[in-house]
Amino acid sequence: MRELLDMWRYTKMVVLVGLAAGLYAAVLIPFKPITIIPGFTEIRPAAVLPVVFSLLFGPAAAWGSAFGNIIGDFFGTLGLGSIFGAIGNFLYGYIPYRLWRRLSAGQPVIRSGRGLLVYLLAVIPACIACGVFIGWGVDLLGLVPFAALANIILVNNLLVSLILGPILLSVLVPRVKRWGLAYGDIMEMEPVSSVRLGGVGHLLLWLGVIGGLAVGNALSFSLLPGLLKGAVGVGVAPFIALIIIGAFLV
Amino acid sequence: MFLYLERDTPLHTLNPVTKIIGLVLLLILPLSTTHPLGLLPSLAFVLFLLYLAKAFRNLRRMWWFVLLLGAVSIVLWSFFRQGQTILFRLGFLSVSRESVLYGLGMGIRLNVMLISGLVFLSCTKVEEFTLGLRKLGLPFSMSFALSLAFRLVPLFFTTASTVLQAQRARGLDLKRGSVIQRVKKYVPLLIPIFVYAVRNTDQLAMALESRGFGARRERTYYIEYQMKKIDLAVLLFLGAADVISFWLL
């Protein structure tokens, strides 16, 4: 977690944040008119970028994804939902490289079944965390129901990052390594958390994403009767806490 | 590309810090109630601000979006919100009079927020926004990265359009095929854009460092904004409007 702040001391990492954010926004904006839920989400081929950036640029991707999403909202959809959008995208750009580092010592190139499995284990929680966090936030504000937005973001992120991610990484990893722009080549990374602490973080993260998604959908579809009005905000909040604590412990 | 409009209005001359805090206060305003009638004064107020900013042109560009936003909100909330007076059922989902009213209220709330954002975007330059964030305490390197990203968007956008046209000329059709096939077609678009964007990182970082990036903690700015009486008056007014609306509704 400390590297999220330490990285700001490295000029190259600052530039990578700007590049990642600019590129994310530039690919997001042309697809703004193709809305799924107007004002909140659209078909996003750009959703692959935070994952790819994360595995290449590490902490710069987390900030870049958050900033890029804010810039995307500057084209007409800026609002309180933008805060949750930024944090959701921050998690989406933060979780994959943390989990990859925990699960594999190698470069993020998917050449074997094991590589694909590690990629899936690194990307799936990030996709769910992003959807659950944004869905929870906008439901809390009373803007869009959790079930409508969280599931759409999740499916879009999963579809795009699982199809495009491995292909893009196989082409880009060697280039980025050659240019000396992989995060490990630019800055000193803090050691991976101890097995026990990281394991707890990993467990909490999975509990948070699966629990948040399940409980959020159940409350949103009113499948759990007798609960209070506005229950999604309260019901999903503990899982949001688990996601955040887990993500930073991993 | 951006929604900023060069106009000579009182809103344009406000301090960037006032504009950012003012936007937050404006966005809080419609949270005071969910009733459509209670939200109408907020809608009228942000429309008045849009008029004051001489920015109806931006709203005209997005009127279809505003209407769609309201309609989608009514449909979504009608199914996802529970109520006593059931109008009809669709499987395990039901639509009630209360849920339709709630959806209408949320549609108005969304539009109040959208128009508040439009007012802000119409009278705030990107440089003012990043400077305002800096004055509010955002570290320089972060505001610089944000500012850099804003500046790079048009460049990357142009590159993306060029690559898209080049690939279309080679026969790429993004509209055909299954969802998976269509998603895969983005590979020949994304790789050249990415490579173009990232290749010059080293040079950009060196150029920044050769100009003393990060060498001094305290920085001076070419444009300095003063906090005037009008800024304080605007913030007090918006703060009071929030307090009163939460107290009344």
Image (spheres, rainbow, N blue to C red):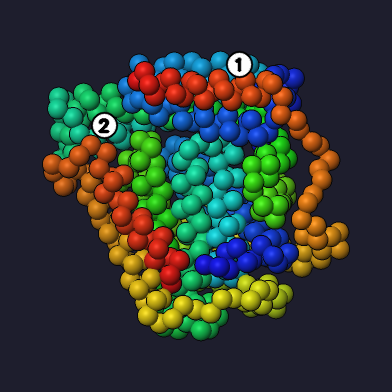
Residue B8 horizontal/vertical position (percent): 75, 19
Kindly identify which numbered label has been placed on residue B188: none
Q: Is residue B116 above or below residue A200?
A: above
Kindly identify which numbered label has been placed on residue B78: 2
Q: Quadrant of residue A12?
A: bottom right
The residue shown at (53%, 83%) is: A106
Q: Dividing the image into 4 quarters, which one contains the C terminus of chain A?
A: bottom left
- Foreground: A74 or B28? B28
Image side of residue B114 versus residue A198, left or right: right
Give SS at disc 2. helix
Q: Quadrant of residue B14?
A: top right
Q: Residues within 10 Å of mark 2 (few under 14, many from 20)?
A: many
Residue B66 horizontal/vertical position (percent): 47, 27
Image side of residue A66 versus residue A233, left or right: right
Q: Earlier in the sequence, mark 1 or mark 2?
A: 1
Q: Is residue A170 above or below residue B167?
A: below
The residue shown at (71%, 29%) is: B227
Mark 1 falls within which chain?
B
Q: Which residue, given by chain and number where applicable, does mark 1 sit on? A: B51
Give SS at disc 1. helix
Mark 2 falls within which chain?
B
Could you tell me how far apart the alpha carbons at marks 1 and 2 are, in whole angstroms?
32 Å
Q: Amino acid at mark 1?
A: Tyr
- Foreground: B205 or A159? B205
Q: Residues within 10 Å of mark 1 (few under 14, many from 20)?
A: few
Q: In this view of the protein, can residue B68 be seen by the observer?
A: no
